[in-house]
Image: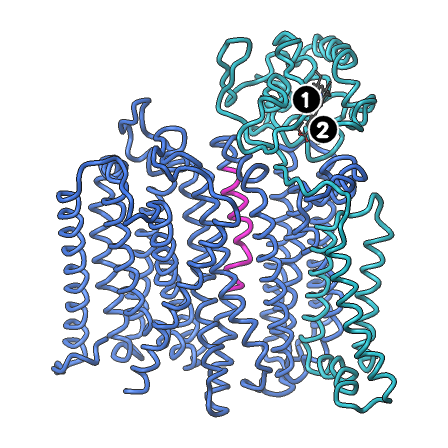
Amino acid sequence: MIRWTFFIALGLWLLVLVGLKLLIAPPIPASVLTLYLVMTTVAIVLFVMANEDRWRAFQAPLRAVFEGRVPRFVQAAVLIALPVLVMGAAYLRLAPTHDAPFEPRVVHPEPPSGFNLKGKRISVSGLKNPLRTDGPELAARIAEGKNIYYRNCFFCHGDSLAGDGHFAGVFRPIPANFRDVGTLSMLQESYVFWRVATGGSGLPKGATPWNSAMPVWQDFLSEDEIWKVVLYIYAGSGSTPRTWEEGTHAGHQ
Amino acid sequence: MSARWPERPATPTARALSQTYKGVLKVSLLLVATYVVAQALSGFLPAAGYRDLLGLSNRTAVWIVAELHLMFAAFVLGVPIFALITEVVGVATKDRRYDDLAREFTKLLAMAYTLTAVLGCTLLVLFVVLYPKFTAYMHGLFKPTWALYLTLIFAEVIFAYLYWYTWDHLQGARKRWHIALGVMVNLWGTALLFIADAWVTFMMSPAGIDEAGNLTSLWAAVANLTWMPINIHRLLANVAFGGAIAAAYAAFRFLAARDDAERARFDWMGYVGSFIAIGAFIPLPFAGYWLGREIYQFSEQMGVSMMGGGFSWLWILQAMLIGSLFFAANVYLWLGMGRIPGAERYTKFQVPMMLILTLGFLVWATPRSIIATGSEMVAMGGSHHPFLGLFGVMAAKNTAVNVMILTTFFSFMLYRRGNRVAVVPWAAAGKAVQALAIAAAAVVVVGYGVYSYYVPSIVRIGYSVYQVTAVLAAMVVFVAIDIPLLKGAREIGPIAWGRIPARAQYALVFLAVTFTWLMGLMGYIRSGIRQHWHVYGRVADESANAYTMTHGDATLIVSGIVVAFFLLVAAVFFMAMREERKA
């Protein structure tokens, strides 16, 4: 087996490349693909290097080619293939595309310590959803929130709350997907309240490029309505708000 | 340094005392000079809230000097811990090599102390000159701790000099006195660290002051929310750092060695250094997790800007570096197994281990929000990939890092067992229990990792504690069995120290550079998340340099600092080698 180290390594590398390219849908963006391939390459090379026998076996075919211990045509093939590969890679890198360029965006912009809600100053830290209580009234509020959601948010954030509403396709960035493990359940309700109330134009300085189409809901909804719709998007997407103190997540206040 | 003094006192004790006295004198002179320079400059310069340093940004100047000071401080705090551990091991195992190793590194201390002190004093002058108003404020708040700090510096210097200069004298029956000295060095050093941490963490998570910024409780200001997490995090990191630098030194000496005896000696030294470095490194992610949690708890805003906001991309760099550390550590061990007769029995484990490490690394480094072009975004339906997005969150990262830790630990254990065959009658049963412990930990880690996607975040955070506990418990069980298991084990052959490929030594150098880089990067994040605040949310930074830099600029500065640090360290090594040759 160890005799074939070089070819196994090469084959493995190609296998990973093909697997990542073809088996994962939607396709992995180039930035992550590059990251993965670089790490795979490093891993394979390190693994080979970590043992004298493997390392020697790995070098053997390379040495054979470059020290001229193989038939001429093999040598020629390698010497032609290498520059062709490099050329191909260079071409792929430089060929013009019609694609919009990278837009690095932060995952979640940091909330301000406070913001203005209809002229009133609201402090974000320590802010709790006043409507999240333990009693039977919670279900009714969630139902009202659902109503508000379908009147206002549904068109963008979608029926299943997955950010795939009717209009979703035309916005960049596309509306948030509440079913994603990295959105609502990572956030405190105070944070979500702030994002809904101040919308895209409330994005802080760090959250370039500030082009989110999310409306400023405090212009259309009352404070209570916003809290209700927040209740609903958590309930509807099956997520729970992030809390820090044990016990409060169920809504004890 | 001592060689330049011509007079030679009669007894070893007198000599140690006189050298210590000189050390104290040197530090006193340095401190007096600093005081005079700082006073003169602040009297001479026109009053201002902020000043520039000859057109250079005040922030960058303080940043570079502070980080270099911190790295050297980490070195002079880490090395005595490292030295003490090896010294005690030497006494316990009666293996002379450990004592020589400890001595070798303590020798570096005197030079390193001097550099640390010079950098610290420069930093102080820079504070007073560039940030006069804020420095005065901090000084006013923390006055009593300053007095204590100064006292401790002297205590530290006295004990460190005594520790070094009594090394040869306090051997044999007197060894325990020497170890006591070593303990003292470390106690004072740790106390120094804790005090400096109080100032730093106060700026991140202030406490003990009223609305106007006046002190209400000094203890509250010291024991603020992030103080203990940073203390522990830095303490562990210092040990790892000290070990890594020691290993890099050994690697360098190995590569420069002229004969087999020297190669054997430095090969062994590199192994011990890396062992301690990685041992201290393993609990580090847990300490970091605790720190992150406290930061979130102090201010969600700060937490989000650290992990999800402007600084989140730097964590991808951090993930790459830490993943590389795991790779390098394992590769070093596997290469080392090449010089252990009998270790080839365990080569077969390398394939699954590398696979696990690579998968862990891939998950660990997967970004949460992905850099993507317009059409890629459309295909993904957002900046979150529906499948890769699962790897972007903490639940996945915790699982990955725990699995990687477990694997690295297993590598170590195989290495340890390398040339030994257990002869105790219960060997088979013991090994089975060990395998079971590792498997159980893996199941707990992965199981909770998967399950945590289905529970609220507060519960999820609890799971990460179970994961850590499982890993630690498995390690304890494993080692507890391993020690009696290998008692009186049959040796297949002696370890051929020195017979290791040169590339293993580069892995050690890589470890040290990566550790240092990580420290610089994480230090920048820790300090940077205060953004435009001196004291977060309380005292605003009103200077022109209060903005947050682009990642490109910031990482360039960090990398520059790392290069500068290694140049300085190389100078210390070089001087130590020259002394050695002269002696």
Quadrant in the rendering for residue B164 = bottom left
Q: Residue at x 32, y 87 (%)?
A: B581
In the picture provided, is B136 more to the left or to the right than A74?
A: left
The residue marked by circle 1 belongs to what chain? A
Q: Which residues are magenta?
A: B277-294
- A132, above or below B542, in the image: above
* Total count of labels: 2
- Mark 1 residue crowding within 10 angstroms, few (<14) / some (14–19) / many (20+): many
- The answer to the question of whether label 2 and label 1 lie on touching residues, with beta carbons closer than 8 A, is yes
- The dot on residue A91 is none
The residue marked by circle 2 belongs to what chain? A
Do we see residue B177 in this rendering? no
Please state which of the two labelled residues, at mark 2 or mark 1, is closer to the viewer.
1
- B429, above or below A172, in the image: below
Do we see residue A74 in this rendering? yes
Instruction: Give the residue number, with chain letter if any, for mark 1.
Output: A214
- Colour cyan maps to chain: A
Q: Earlier in the sequence, mark 2 or mark 1?
A: 2
- The dot on residue A176 is 2
Q: Position of residue B222 (x, y in %)?
A: 33, 38
- B10, above or below A139, in the image: below
- Mark 2 residue crowding within 10 angstroms, few (<14) / some (14–19) / many (20+): many
The front one of B23 and B542 is B542
| Three-letter amino acid code at the position of disc 2 | Ala
Q: Position of residue B537 (x, y in %)?
A: 40, 29
Q: Judging from the image, what secondary structure is the residue with disc 2 in?
A: loop
- Colour blue maps to chain: B
- B480, above or below A78, in the image: above
